[in-house]
Image (cartoon, rainbow, N blue to C red):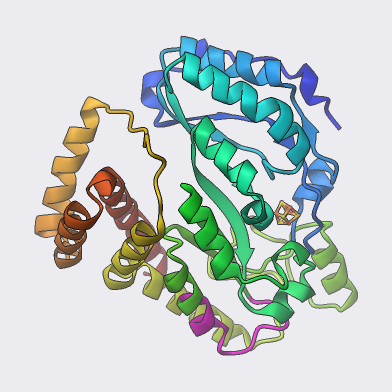
Amino acid sequence: MADLRKTPIPSWGLINIKHYASINIQYSRGCPFNCEFCDITLLCGRIPRTKNKDQIIRELESVYASGFKGQVFFVDDNFIGNKKKLKEEVLPAIIEWMELRRHPFTFNTQTSIELSDHNDLMEMMVRAGFDVVFIGIETPHEQSLEECSKFQNRNRDLLASVRKIQKSGLEVQGGFIVGFDNDPPTIFDTQIRFIQTSGVVTAMVGILTALPRTQLYERLKKEERLFKEATGNNTDFSTNFIPRMDYDLLISGYKKVLSTLYSPKHYYERVRTFLREYVPPRKKLFHFRFNYIAAFIKSIIVLGIIGKERFHYWRLLFWTMLTRPRLVPQAVTLSIYGFHFRKVFEKRLG
Ligand code: SF4
């Protein structure tokens, strides 16, 4: 396994940084959990390897020196894999650096759900400038969580955990899976209900797929249920093993989940649920760029005048202006994301 402490600083001069809406850096690799379908632990190990705080500060300084301002994505497998080091060394250093540099970035990353059990960690992340976390929620169906050894998600009120994170000032994006052996035929409606109630606006739903060498792959191989190698894309309306559920039912149920979640009615409803729950930090950072004005005008034309979602778009905009005026930029941004997701899914659904 590579020693992250020896990773050199990226040469940002090799790219035109102005062409990027988001820049990636990495603090750690690996994850202490052991979900059956996941290949992260195979590839990157279960003991998180981390960079040290000075390295992270040097990397942030290098992004800053490149002239970039805006979203920086910590592309970690599980950013909170080593909570002690994060709380005692890395986050305090990032907080200090961000204050010194007058908050040039906002951060997003990937974590596991037990982030919600650590108020101090959430508070520090928000102070450091984090505003979005992606979490593998997978399924609200307890037996399916047990099946895939997603123990950190079990025996907890997942909705309450999501809300707690939203209230701390972090938007939760979520990964969801259908196609577990224990999924009942009602799982599609259960997932839709859960996602709508949670206000997880960006819900990445995929079909369970057996990636090479994972525990899931080895189990299905023994059970003689694998029929091809995984494509690596778990949203292509197929899987590579014989599911317990009827195959056609699984695919049509999956299509129903996607087309419902990203229909204008459901999508905009979810944005409102999120904005209602979300408590932005007192000093919510917004990095203004001139092209945001162009994007806003374009959203008015494409979503508010031409688009079939125009009623929902204006309703959201007026509702946000009246009830959560500070969150108008977020409402517009999420409306634009929704349009993008819908176009992608409509193209795939044919
Ligand atoms: S928590 Fe996420 S990264 Fe960690 S093993 Fe489970 S799926 Fe993989």
* Residue that sits furthest to the right in the current view: 222
Position of residue 220 measured from the top left corner of the image (x, y, whole percent): 82, 73
Q: Quadrant of ligand 1?
A: bottom right
Position of residue 269 measured from the top left corner of the image (x, y, whole percent): 31, 68
Q: Is residue 177 left or right of residue 147?
A: left
Q: Quadrant of residue 21?
A: top left
Give the residue displayed 79% in from the left and 17% down from the top.
6
Is 274 in front, or is 222? Answer: 274
Number of numbered tags placed on the structure image: 0
- Residue 292 is at least partly visible in this image: yes
Please identify the quadrant where the N terminus is shown. top right
Q: Is residue 103 above or below residue 36?
A: above
Please identify the quadrant where the C terminus is shown. bottom left
Is 262 in front, or is 156? Answer: 156
Q: Is residue 111 left or right of residue 98?
A: right
Q: Which contiguous range is marked in magenta?
A: 179-192
Give the residue displayed 21% in from the left and 60% down from the top.
316
Instruction: Decide whether residue 188 is among the magenta residues.
Output: yes
Give the residue displayed 63% in from the left and 21% down from the top.
93
Q: Is residue 289 above or below residue 187?
A: above
